[in-house]
Amino acid sequence: MARLEAESKMGFYATPEEVVKKIKEMLQIPEGSRLLDPCCGEGDALSQIAEGTGAETFGVELDRGRFECAREKLDNVLWADALNEVKISKNSFGLLFLNPPYDYDYDPLSGEVERLEVKFMRKYFPALQDKGVLILIVPFNILDKFAEFSGKLKDLRVFLFPEGESRFRQVVLFAIKQRVSRSEASKNAEVLNRSSMCTYYWDLGVPIIIHVDDITYTVPPSDGEVVFKSRKFDPHEAVSKVKGSPAWKKFQALIALKDRDTISPLTPLREGHLALLLASGIMNGEVKANGRRMIIKGVVDQKEEKIEEEEGDKTRKTRWVTRYAIKIRAILPDELEPKVITIQ
């Protein structure tokens, strides 16, 4: 289920600066490593962690306003639903900083209810490279939901948020992605499952993170190609690329010529004629309609349609018919909120 943008605003809770500062102190980050935050908000936490390290930062944010802030602070940011619209390569990041929305997700098709935090972990844990560092920030009473990862977490430690900052009774989980022995996996599962039996936050019996010393997790350097893409179409990005294209500059120079030949039809074109001209590509480019400037592109989709007919002797005959659908896509670059419209 895709998160609605309204839900993303209510489900976003930035990591306190005091906690981020302590997390950074517990990390050793070499130059050339890749750091990933799939719920980066305005990018403050990851940019603070990466500051002065030479690491490359990657973030994902659904809310448009927070995305605009994050792109000023991080090296690579996607405006997308991190669960459903992001394509990301496996084993490509040295650090996964995961502070996901705290909520349930209901699937009306299956009727299943599941924690969003766990769905984010399943989506992005494979992106963490071997011996990469995991930092997971979640409410303490759902730690048992992550027991399925017990066999792949080495040096697992859990710390409490400081008093006054634990609005949702969060904990910070540190671990290294690495297969462990059965005994260590059982120990990890015990640590995670213990939270479900605690009545009170402080019953966990683990230290407050700001009081922890002499613990260091080393982030491994990253190499190789990385895939980090969004399936979400960003009109702002499209407009900026179009405006910066050399082909677009040539086209603007072409349409600026005043003395050019024009061809006028003998009679006004009908809608079908215009549609065919658009689909053929003859009319691609900049047009004006009702005072609005548009950049248009016509395309034709070919589809095979199955048709079953009944003959006179009541036998059924199947035949395939090719149908053509004409579509016109237009970018409105001058709008306050640039967008793309499709006419079919």
Image: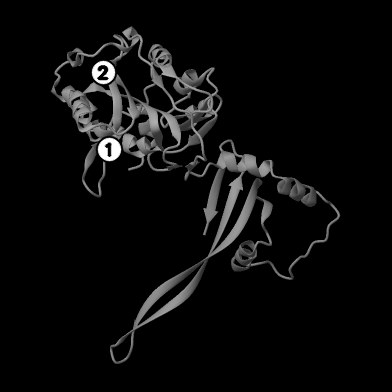
Q: Which amino acid does label 2 sit on?
A: Arg
Q: Residue 169 carries which label?
A: 2
Label 2 CA crowd tier, 10 Å (few <14, some 14–19, many 20+) = some
Residue 156: x and y in percent read 28, 23
Quick check: 185 left or right of 132?
Answer: left
Give residue 164's quadrant in the image.
top left
- Which comes sooner in the sequence, label 2 or label 1? 1
Q: Residue 105 carries which label?
A: 1
Q: What residue type is labelled 1?
A: Asp
Is residue 313 among what the camera can see?
Answer: yes
Residue positioned 48% across, 36% down in the render:
79
Give residue 133's quadrant in the image.
top left
Tag 2–tag 1 contact (CB < 8 Å): no
Q: Which mark's residue is nearer the viewer, 2 or 1?
A: 2
Residue positioned 30% across, 14% down in the render:
161
Give the Cα separation between the discs numbered 2 and 1. 20 Å
Residue positioned 32% across, 12% down in the render:
209
Q: Which of 278 and 170 is in front in this view?
A: 170
Q: Which of 118 and 183 is in front in this view?
A: 183
Is residue 290 among what the camera can see?
Answer: no
